[in-house]
Image (cartoon, rainbow, N blue to C red):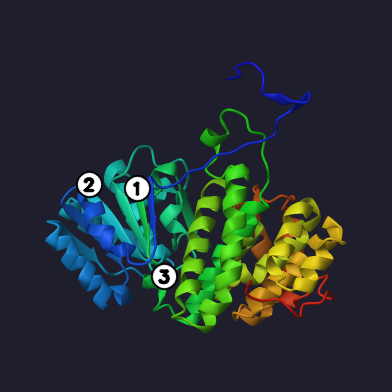
Amino acid sequence: MWINHPPRVGGTVCLMFAALRAPSEIMFGEGKRAALPAVARRYGTRAFVCVDPFIAQGSEFATLLEALSNEGIDTHVFADVVPDLPVATVAVALERARNFEPDVLIGIGGGSSIDLAKITSALLTNRSHVRELYGEFKVLGPVLPIVAVPTTAGTGSEATPVAVLTDPERINKVGISSPYLIPSVAICDPELTYSCPPSVTASSGADALAHCIEALTAIRRPAHATVLLERVFVGRGELTDALAILGIRHLSSGLQTAYREPMNVQARADVMFGSLLAGLAFATAGTAAAHAIQYPVGAVTHTPHGVGVGTLLPFVMEFNREYCVPEMALIARLFDASPLAQQADQDQSEAELAARAPALVARFLGAVGIPSDLAALGFPSDKIDWAAEQAIQAARLAENNPRRLDLAAAKRILGAALDGNLSNTAVPLDHIGDKA
């Protein structure tokens, strides 16, 4: 163990850095939802369950409620969760939860359901108004235990320290970021995603892919002793790199098939596992410019978050490319399934491979219906300056980008994305698709 000096190898400073914020336990696999009652019972006998109306009406949810009851757990079901979680919904849920006095909170559904469980848990123990928690490290103490059961594969909320909501007093979505918000247990059952329609599969999958790529290409900060105490998103490290790369492998293997064949068991498992890995990666490394710019774009177009992020991602990759050439080259290898291309990679430089990555990702996402430009989302050209200003105000994201994201840079990305003017698209793209 070194005390005064870092370890050195061959006379140079060792630059390795690794950190990981994650749930205490993760259960992944078909049928794992059956473990929910026993897991919840660890924490007590009163469970406040956050779920959206669609899930609440399903037979699977009724089965879970019955199983919780059989385990001796009283439940209060809050089934008024809606997308883009409004702050008004948080207030209603909090009042009901306080009256119920739960031992554990359970989020079943997409990101909004899990995020509502996180925020409600934090407010029950912190006794704050929700607006007092906006930003980083504002949750000042431990929260009630949270069990997350995702039914979509994209947000990664089951593994992250972040909850996002919509506040009418704010133009963009706002985030609450704290390690205390990480669920105690994540139960990830791919069978729960079978009912996701193709559009949701595509949007969620694009979001997960952006999580992986932005975590892998995030800024690498000096690994000083207090970095984890100063930022929730600390930038990339050895552990998050490994998770992000494996996440890309699974998403590239499964997303297009899951989009075309909703009941394909292996594809659904690949996409949910990729989403989980993406959540674990960005929970520590963070996301960057694509997410920062999507928030104002989404506020104008009212389009799903994953669709906006997926549309912007290739343009952000192109903007960042020269600042993370090895990572972009690796992404290119992961997305080109052609045996000839894999053989040719041996003769290409890292820079040549990196130049192909944005177009390869754009083609991949286009195959699941993600638009190739912002015009298709209805984003108007007269909003570029405003959106750029809003994007750079999301400092925790903008500062995580490997290349400086200032006002001029944000305008440049938005202009290119509006026109669909992605450079380096003249490379052969005949063999892009699911990995074998």
1 or 3: tag closer to the N-terminus: 3
Label 2 belongs to which residue?
A: 43
Labels 1 and 2: the sequence-earlier one = 2
28 relative to 312, above or below: above
Q: Nearer the viewer, residue 169 or 256?
A: 256
Name the residue at 59% across, 79% down.
368
Name the residue rendered at 61%, 79% in the picture. 377
Q: Residues within 10 Å of mark 1 (few under 14, many from 20)?
A: many
Residue that mark 1 sits on: 184
Residue situated furthest top in the rendering:
4
Q: Amino acid at mark 1?
A: Ser
For discs 2 and 3, the disc positioned in front in the rendered view: 2
Q: Describe residue 71's horizontal placement relative to residue 212 as left or right.
A: left
Q: Nearer the viewer, mark 1 or mark 3?
A: 1
User: Which SS class for mark 1?
Assistant: loop
Label 1, label 2: how many angstroms apart (C-alpha)?
10 Å
Looking at the image, which residue is at 27% across and 73% down?
60
Identified by mark 2, the residue type is: Tyr
Q: Residue furthest bottom?
A: 260
Residue 369 sits in which quadrant? bottom right
Query: In the rendered image, which residue does mark 3 sit on?
Result: 83
Image position of 70 (left or right of 207): left
Q: Residues within 10 Å of mark 2 (few under 14, many from 20)?
A: some
Q: In the rendered image of this protein, does residue 300 appear above or below residue 239?
A: below
Q: Can residue 303 be seen from the camera position used here?
A: no
* Tag shown at residue 209: none
Asked if labels 2 and 1 touch by Cβ distance under 8 angstroms, the answer is yes
Q: Nearer the viewer, residue 376 or 262?
A: 262
Residue 426, position as x, y percentages in the image: 84, 76
Nearest the camera: 3 or 125? 3
> Residue 151 sits in which quadrant?
bottom left
